[in-house]
Image (cartoon, rainbow, N blue to C red):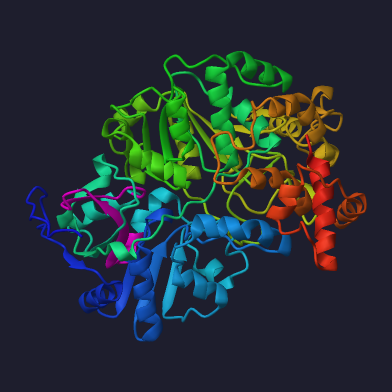
């Protein structure tokens, strides 16, 4: 438990005093309502930093009393995955129980999905968990479209009167770390000290958070209220790392060749981020192998040498790949005594453990700072410019048009898939810095309902990054350098990195629109952009362990990892393909028996189970090395 904190007079403006301590979230919610009245505008951090117990208590109070108006301003509400379909449930059930047991769901999310959240409670998100709310008209209407750097302004305009956050105390209980989410909190507190905002600041302690110092650290006196009860603390939300496909590795190998030694790196979460990390490690530690793979892909950038000066990280999200890059000696260039500056983090259980177990000296090299620092150049601009030399800001996208516009957050009917977040911020920085580039990593295709579709499109009715900010687009099939090029040159470059199954239709569309000459022909060197070509170029390296499914470890068991390619094949298969797999089946042997056991199909009892068993054996045979 936390002892009452001493008063602090270090800050000017607002007088800091000891926070009022609570061991029950309901009583804390009542204290907040007693202070604010029945109109509550509650700001919660993005992602991991939400105080679930306190937030749920406030929601319960508002659900029980319709005279309470509760507006929640937040982003990325984390939800435990829900399996769809019997095979997926068989696979994901044990995984979910193992990784998410004990994590308290957010009541407002549960009630929104069920259609039961009363209308005196409104949830405004500026970034959504990808795809979660596509079918919710209420959340589509409540979404606030915002660059991450503008969120502070919008929260202040909303007259926020409560800010609440998950925090971790130091051993003395007199100082606290915002840990995973400095986010916009330091800027909100600065506004409160300067008298331009007035709100209750409430913390909820959780000892599982890594204690991050620097700007993520603050005196206990900043808090008005603290919920501190070890019995109520919960395991952190810890999504497992995603499997890295061969296409992801191809993107990673190409992107790594664009990153200069002595430069600055920003990457995002997910399998493409891990693929880029693996390629950078390979380039540094096994340069001969990296160069051979880059040559096998036929097209790569000029940056192929190992890292002498190393990289510095300036990333909105501290992805766990940065720890792997530090360990490998790739990220070793310091700026202001730090290896990485990040605004928030979210990752696997191993990621949190590594951060907690680091020495104080090693952890101090990782600076958690406000998003206003990493996402923007304003404020200490000369210092930031000096640190962010030769920057490569790498973000992922859903689609890109032939003329270079990027679609990352929404659909052409207006529905929001996720949000803009900080993507625009980093693209803008790439143009503001003299030697920086924006790199958009894009899978050339996607599968939907058994059909393969191109992610390079002629045009699209929604844009995240407009074409006048087009820069570099990397797919598994090549690198399209678009900056400063004519529209015809851009169309030609984008055709070169599209999947060859769609190139002719895309070329016809561009010709009809008058965006490329009628006699243009796609070069033969780019006419074999196919998965088979990738397999021929990289398949041997996969088998040799150079391009593993999980380059930096996994929470999945060996059996689960072995099942993933087969389950992926079944998930993306069309009806005709499923029939073929069922008819073909596959052998039951020493390799497949443990996998059938893991899926509960070793002794099928029903006709459906026997069909699933045959499909799985067929898929296992179809994906065997």
Q: What is the quadrant of residue 85 in the picture? A: bottom right
Q: Is residue 303 visible?
A: no
Image position, residue 496 (x, y; %) = 75, 30
The residue closer to the viewer here, 244 or 606, is 606
Image position, residue 415 (x, y; %) = 61, 62
Q: Against 301, is 243 above or below?
A: below
- Left or right for 484, reference 497: left
The residue closer to the viewer here, 357 or 82, is 357
Q: What is the quadrant of residue 538 in the picture? A: top right
The residue closer to the viewer here, 592 or 22, is 592
Q: Is residue 259 visible?
A: yes
How many marks can you see?
A: 0
Image position, residue 625 (x, y; %) = 78, 34
Report the residue at 16% width, 62% height from top.
19
Residue 493 colored magenta? no
Q: Against 557, is 167 above or below?
A: below
Report the residue at 52% width, 54% height from top.
419
Report the residue at 86% width, 47% height from top.
586
In the picture, the quarter occupied by the N terminus is bottom left
Report the residue at 80% width, 29% height from top.
533
Q: Which residues are magenta?
A: 155-181
Q: What is the quadrant of residue 517 in the picture? A: top right
- Left or right for 264, reference 253: left
Residue 176 colored magenta? yes
């Amino acid at each position: 438990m936390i002892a009452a904190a001493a008063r602090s007079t270090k800050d000017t403006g607002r007088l800091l005093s000891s926070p009022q301590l609570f061991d029950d979230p309901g009583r804390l919610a009542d204290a907040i309502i007693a202070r604010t009245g029945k109109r509550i505008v509650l700001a919660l951090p993005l992602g991991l930093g939400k105080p679930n117990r306190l937030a749920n208590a406030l929601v319960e109070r508002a659900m029980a009393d319709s005279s309470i108006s509760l507006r929640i301003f937040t982003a990325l509400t984390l939800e435990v995955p829900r399996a769809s379909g019997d095979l997926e449930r068989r696979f994901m059930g044990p995984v979910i129980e193992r990784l998410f047991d004990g994590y308290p769901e957010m009541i407002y999310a549960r009630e929104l999905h069920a259609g039961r959240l009363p209308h005196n409670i409104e949830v405004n998100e500026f970034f959504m968990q990808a795809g979660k709310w596509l079918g919710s008209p209420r959340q589509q209407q409540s979404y606030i479209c915002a660059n991450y750097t503008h969120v502070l302004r919008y929260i202040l305009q909303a007259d926020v009167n409560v800010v609440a956050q998950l925090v971790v105390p130091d051993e003395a209980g007199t100082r606290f770390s915002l840990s995973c989410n400095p986010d916009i909190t330091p800027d909100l507190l600065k506004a409160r000290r300067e008298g331009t905002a007035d709100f209750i600041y409430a913390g909820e302690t959780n000892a599982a958070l890594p204690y991050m110092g620097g700007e993520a650290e603050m005196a206990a006196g900043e808090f008005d209220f603290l919920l501190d009860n070890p019995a109520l603390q919960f395991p952190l939300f810890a999504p497992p790392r995603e499997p890295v496909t061969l296409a992801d590795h191809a993107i990673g190998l190409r992107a790594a060749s664009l990153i200069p030694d002595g430069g600055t790196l920003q990457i995002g979460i997910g399998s493409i981020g891990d693929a880029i990390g693996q390629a950078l490690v390979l380039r540094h530690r096994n340069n001969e192998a990296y160069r051979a793979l880059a040559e096998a892909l036929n097209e790569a950038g000029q940056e192929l040498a190992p890292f002498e000066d190393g990289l510095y990280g300036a990333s909105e999200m501290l992805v766990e790949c940065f720890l792997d890059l530090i360990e490998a000696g790739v990220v070793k260039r310091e700026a202001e005594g730090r290896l990485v500056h990040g605004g928030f983090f979210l990752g696997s259980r191993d990621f949190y453990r590594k951060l907690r177990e680091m020495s104080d000296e090693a952890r101090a090299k990782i600076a958690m700072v406000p998003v206003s620092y990493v996402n923007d150049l304003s404020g200490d601009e000369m210092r930031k410019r000096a640190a962010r030399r030769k920057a490569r800001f790498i973000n992922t996208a859903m689609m890109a048009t032939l003329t270079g516009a990027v679609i990352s957050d929404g659909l052409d009917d207006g529905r929001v898939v996720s949000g803009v977040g900080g993507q625009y911020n980093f693209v803008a920085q790439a143009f503001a810095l003299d030697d920086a580039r924006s790199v958009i990593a894009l899978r050339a295709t996607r599968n939907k309902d058994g059909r393969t579709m191109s992610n390079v499109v002629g045009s699209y009715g929604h844009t995240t990054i407009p074409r006048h900010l087009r820069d570099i687009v990397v797919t598994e099939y090549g690198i399209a350098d678009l900056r400063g090029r004519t529209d015809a040159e851009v169309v030609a470059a984008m055709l070169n990195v599209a999947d060859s199954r769609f190139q002719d239709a895309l070329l016809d569309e561009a010709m009809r629109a008058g965006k490329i000459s009628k006699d243009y022909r796609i070069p033969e060197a780019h006419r074999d952009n196919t998965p088979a070509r990738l397999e021929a170029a990289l398949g041997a390296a996969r088998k040799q362990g150079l391009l593993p499914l999980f380059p930096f470890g996994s929470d999945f068991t060996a059996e689960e990892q072995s099942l993933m390619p087969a389950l992926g094949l079944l998930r993306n298969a069309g009806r005709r393909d499923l029939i073929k797999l069922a008819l073909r089946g596959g052998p039951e042997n020493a390799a497949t028996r443990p996998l059938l056991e893991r899926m509960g199909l070793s002794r099928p009892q029903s006709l459906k189970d026997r069909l699933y068993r045959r499909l799985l054996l067929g898929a296992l045979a179809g994906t065997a090395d």
